[in-house]
């Protein structure tokens, strides 16, 4: 179905706390590669950040994090001259299309979203309505540009399936066959689900209370090395085959992180380190992580020293994105029956 639509990549990250290794290996690293393969648009989803954070006290945090996430995109290798970067809130059509999609998506579909269940926890009735309809806005982020490819981590698979369902139902209900593409999730590489360094059964996450659970993109060499040295492991030596990684989530995670950072297959990492103790492997992993990540942190610091330049980049990116979004939104309004 996407064959009828020109290839276009869209993805985004939330400006809540600092980005971590999972965001980098699961998504950002693939964005850098994809920008040489297809046209891309990358945004900072600041409206999504309000689904859990709100109020005056948080406003400055959202603003600072929006700039910092933009700096991370650029520092990791996204070229703003080639690829528009912008904040979601700068292109009003995201919210406009999200309303239409709220009328397309079914409550039953949203009820199945596991991320809402995780984020709302035991207090569903106290969660914002925005948290519940979060994936509908995400579908609008993608489809307002008729994007065909969405590079994300494994945890976003269900949201991408919902995006396809919304696109399909819109196309059917409004007798607009093929109007929206059915976008594909691009989930590739060994780093699509990076786990906590403290607990191999939990995802590495911005919201984990323990800073030792994650490597932040802003961590310095000492912090990176210390977190890897303290990472949970099991008492056995490193396995020699992928089969033996089963049931050893911490070993699996550290090997996957090494493979993703070194851009080597897991089998090659096991061939090199299999049978060895964790201590030596952790030293090698710490060295690799420091070599790959500290230049990104340094470049982020340099970029954050000139926030006016970051704001200019976002504004220029938003202008380009708006041109596409306005044209799609005009068609949507006509299709659903709005007069204006
Ligand atoms: P967010 O901000 O939670 O995460 C940003 C990206 O990082 C990936 N990711 C991970 N990958 C591997 N291991 C992990 N531990 C890990 N943690 C996070 C996420 O899969 C994501 O790709 N809903 C999205 C934001 C969004 C979006 C969009 C994405 C809003 N609109 C449109 C794509 C297209 C999210 O929660 O991102």
Image: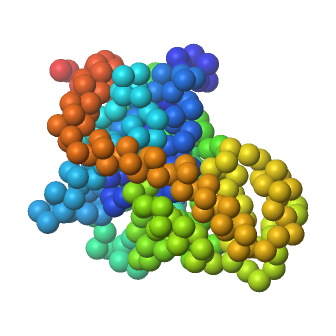
Q: Is residue 185 visible?
A: yes
Coordinates of residue 237 in the picture (x, y in percent): 82, 75
Horizontal side, residue 163 vs residue 260: left or right = left
Count of numbered tags: 0
As displayed, is residue 288 above or below residue 188? below
Coordinates of residue 58 in the picture (x, y in percent): 18, 63
The residue nearer to you, when weighing 278 against 172, is 278
Q: Residue at x 51, y 65 (%)?
A: 224
As displayed, is residue 258 above or below residue 143? below
Q: Residue at x 18, y 20 (%)?
A: 340
Q: Residue furthest left?
A: 56
Q: Quadrant of the N terminus?
A: top right
Horizontal side, residue 63 vs residue 249: left or right = left
Coordinates of residue 61 in the picture (x, y in percent): 22, 59
Q: Residue furthest bottom?
A: 235
As displayed, is residue 229 above or below residue 144? below
Q: Residue at x 77, y 83 (%)?
A: 235
Q: Residue at x 54, y 23 (%)?
A: 36
State the scheme by which the image is colored: rainbow
Q: Is residue 95 visible?
A: no
The residue nearer to you, when weighing 131 against 165, is 131
The residue nearer to you, when weighing 221 against 313, is 221
Coordinates of residue 184 in the picture (x, y in percent): 58, 35
């Amino acid at each position: 179905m996407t064959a009828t639509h020109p290839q276009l990549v869209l993805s985004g990250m939330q400006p809540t706390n600092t980005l971590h290794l999972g965001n980098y290996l699961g998504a950002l690293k693939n964005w850098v590669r994809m920008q040489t393969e297809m046209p891309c648009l990358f945004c900072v989803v600041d409206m999504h950040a309000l689904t859990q954070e709100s109020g005056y006290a948080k406003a400055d945090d959202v603003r600072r994090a929006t700039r910092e996430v933009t700096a991370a995109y650029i520092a990791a290798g996204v070229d703003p001259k080639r690829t528009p970067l912008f904040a979601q809130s700068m292109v009003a059509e995201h919210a406009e299309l999200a309303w239409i999609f709220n009328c397309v998506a079914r409550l039953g579909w949203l009820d199945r979203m596991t991320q809402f269940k995780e984020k709302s926890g035991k207090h569903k009735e106290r969660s914002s309505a925005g948290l519940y309809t979060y994936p509908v806005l995400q579908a609008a982020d993608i489809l307002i540009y008729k994007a065909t490819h969405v590079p994300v981590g494994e945890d976003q698979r269900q949201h991408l399936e919902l995006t396809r369902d919304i696109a399909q139902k819109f196309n059917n209900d409004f007798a607009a066959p093929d109007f929206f593409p059915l976008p594909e999730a691009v989930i590739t590489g060994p780093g699509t689900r990076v786990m906590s360094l403290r607990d191999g059964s939990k995802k590495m996450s911005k919201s984990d209370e323990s800073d030792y659970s994650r490597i932040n993109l802003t961590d310095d060499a000492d912090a990176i090395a210390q977190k890897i040295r303290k990472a949970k492991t099991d008492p056995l030596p490193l396995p020699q085959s992928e089969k033996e990684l089963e049931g050893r989530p911490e070993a699996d995670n550290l090997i996957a992180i090494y493979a993703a950072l070194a851009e080597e297959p897991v089998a090659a990492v096991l061939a090199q380190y299999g049978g060895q103790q964790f201590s030596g492997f952790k030293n090698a992993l710490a060295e690799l992580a420091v070599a790959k990540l500290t230049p990104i942190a340094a470049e982020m610091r340099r970029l954050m020293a000139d926030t006016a330049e970051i704001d200019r980049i976002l504004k220029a990116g938003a202008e380009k994105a708006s041109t596409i979004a306005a044209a799609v939104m005009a068609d949507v309004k006509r299709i659903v029956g709005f007069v204006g």
